[in-house]
Structures are given as structure tokens and as C-alpha cells.
Amino acid sequence: MLIRYTVRQSPLADLRLVCFHESGHAIVGAILGLNPKFEIIPTGKKNDPHDKAFRGQTGYFGPGTQELDAVACWAGPIAECKFLGEAFSDYEHVRTACSYTDKKSIMEHSYPEQTFARALSMVIEHWPRITAEAEAAIEDSKTRFAEHL
């Protein structure tokens, strides 16, 4: 069962989770030709144990379709689950890892199971690229947002 952590062990743990989630969106989006850009944003809540210290945001600036957008949206929560070592074989299960925006984009598409399956296979196939992108984002964010860690 997927466990969403409402209390983070540390802002750095939260940063790592957000970077893997956004890197999933970004790498799969790039492969699909969506020209993604993502950013990591400190929330300023590092001392609040019930909220995240960081959030992420990924935008797509290339031509796409609703189906491609849904595939890229699924890739974020799937990458997050893979990073945490949690099972992700059931799309409803992973859907709990989605942000409100992810859920909205995914569920606007008529075939969530189909787009989930495609995203899952892409995340598995491109996991080394997702990991490299996430690790680079983590290192960059540690420098840029040192006061939040």
C-alpha cells in the first residue's frame, strides 16, 4: 500500500522526493516531445513538520495531445513511488501520489489505465535518466536553497 508521508523526516528528504517526482514528468515529457521545463520551489515551511519544505512545478511547452500530457503526468507519481521503493502496479494505487494538478490532467483523459501503462513502461525504461536528472536537481537545489535545508 502506498503511504504518503504528511510529516517529512527532513527538508532534504522532501527535496529528494520532489526532485524525483518532477524528473519523472520532465524526462518522460521530453521523450514524448513536450519540451518540459521544471523548477523546484522552496515553500518557506521548513520548520512546519506537517507540511512540505519544497514543491515542484513542471510545464510543457511543446506540441502535445491530451493523451501525451496524461502520460507525462503519470510519470511523476510513478517515479516518486519507484524512488520510495513502493509498488506501482495499480494505477489507483499510484494515483494517491498525484498532486491535484496531476490528477486533474490524468483524469481528463478518457483512458487512465492506458496512459498509466505507457507511463509505467517509460519510467522503468528510462529510470537511469530520471535518476540522473533528479540527482542533478537535488545538487542544484542544495546550493540554491541552502537556507531551506
Image: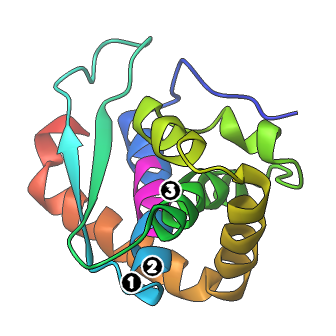
SS type, badge 1: helix
Q: Earlier in the sequence, mark 3 or mark 1?
A: 1
Residue 73 is tagged as 3
Residue 27 is tagged as 2
On the image, the x and y values in percent for residue 147 come to 12, 39
Please tell me how crowded label 1 is: few (under 14), some (14-19), or many (20+) other residues with Cα within 10 Å.
Answer: some
Residue 6 is tagged as none
Say which amino acid is labelled 1: Ala
| Quarter of the rendering containing residue 124 | bottom right
On the image, the x and y values in percent for residue 130 come to 51, 77
- Taking 84 as reference, is 113 left or right? right
Most prominent secondary structure in the magenta stretch? helix
Which residue is painted at 27% across and 24% down in the image?
46
Residue corresponding to mark 1: 30
Q: Earlier in the sequence, mark 2 or mark 3?
A: 2
Q: Are marks 2 and 3 in contact (CB under 8 Å)?
A: no
- Taking 119 as reference, is 9 left or right? left
- Dot in front, 1 or 2: 1
- Between residues 97 and 53, which one lies in front from this camera angle? 97
Q: CA distance from mark 1 to mark 2?
A: 5 Å
Q: CA distance from mark 2 to mark 3?
A: 11 Å
- Taking 82 as reference, is 40 left or right? left
Magenta extent: 18-23
- Taking 93 as reference, is 65 left or right? left
- Between residues 48 and 88, which one lies in front from this camera angle? 88
Q: Are marks 3 and 1 in contact (CB under 8 Å)?
A: no
